[in-house]
């Protein structure tokens, strides 16, 4: 075998090996993709399974009220007059039970703490 024939046979061998490595890389990429698809499908399936077991309440309660069992809004408490129990004060004179010191519709002073009731 001469040098030219040897070079051609080496080129064919390298080309064949190169094609095999490209094919292997493609198969490897496809296997990797399949692994990711399987993992994602497992997460979705597992989430659906857990959701069916625990059945969480995903309803959003309306503002100012809670949900009743049948899904309707529970009657909320009647609105409280912010001026009820108001004590005007030019400056903070210490904490007072059931009151908060702030500026409101009546000006600066102590207002009933409606959030703690």
Image (spheres, rainbow, N blue to C red):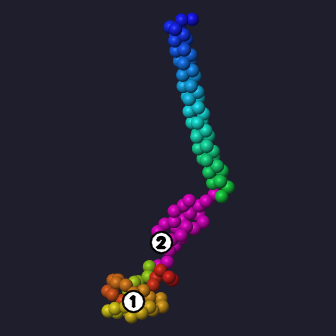
Q: Is residue 99 magenta?
A: no
Residue 44 visible within the image: yes
Q: Closest to the observer: 54 or 13?
A: 13
Distance from label 2 to label 1 (Cα)?
24 Å
Dot 2 crowding, Cα within 10 Å, few <14, some 14–19, many 20+ = few
**Lateral position of residue 58 relative to residue 100, left or right:** right
Q: Which of the labelled discs sits on residue 64, or is there none?
A: 2
Which of the 4 image quarters holds residue 72? bottom right
Asked whether residue 112 is in view, the answer is no
Residue that extends furthest to the right in the rendered view of this protein: 53
Q: Reply above or below: 90 against 72.
A: below
Judged left or right of residue 94, residue 36 is: right
Quarter of image, res 53:
bottom right
Q: Which of the pair 18/25 is nearer the observer?
A: 18
Could you tell me which residue is drawn at 50 percent across and 71 percent down?
A: 65
Q: Position of residue 63 (x, y in %)?
A: 47, 68
Verify CB contact (< 8 Å) between mark 2 and mark 1: no
Q: Residue furthest top?
A: 1
Q: Residues within 10 Å of mark 1 (few under 14, many from 20)?
A: many
Residue 17 at x, y percent in the picture: 57, 21
Residue that badge 1 annotates: 110
Q: Secondary structure at mark 2?
A: loop
- Which quadrant, please, contains the N terminus? top right
Which one is earlier in the sequence, the residue at label 2 or at label 1?
2
Above-or-below relation of 82 to 8: below
What residue lies at 32% left-to-right and 86% top-to-bottom? 107
| Callout 1 secondary element | strand
Q: Is residue 62 magenta?
A: yes
Residue range corresponding to the magenta coloring? 55-78
Q: Nearer the viewer, mark 2 or mark 1?
A: 1
The percent coordinates of residue 20 (x first, y second) are 58, 22
């Amino acid at each position: 075998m001469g040098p030219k024939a040897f070079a051609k046979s080496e080129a064919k061998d390298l080309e064949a090996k190169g094609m095999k490595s490209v094919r292997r890389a493609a198969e490897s990429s496809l296997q990797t993709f399949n692994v990711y698809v399987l993992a994602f499908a497992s997460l979705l399936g597992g989430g659906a399974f857990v959701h069916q077991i625990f059945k969480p309440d995903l309803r959003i309660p309306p503002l100012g009220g809670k949900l009743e069992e049948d899904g309707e809004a529970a009657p909320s408490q009647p609105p409280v007059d912010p001026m009820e129990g108001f004590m005007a004060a030019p400056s903070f004179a210490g904490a007072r039970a059931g009151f908060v010191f702030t500026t409101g519709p009546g000006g600066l002073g102590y207002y009933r703490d409606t959030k703690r009731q």
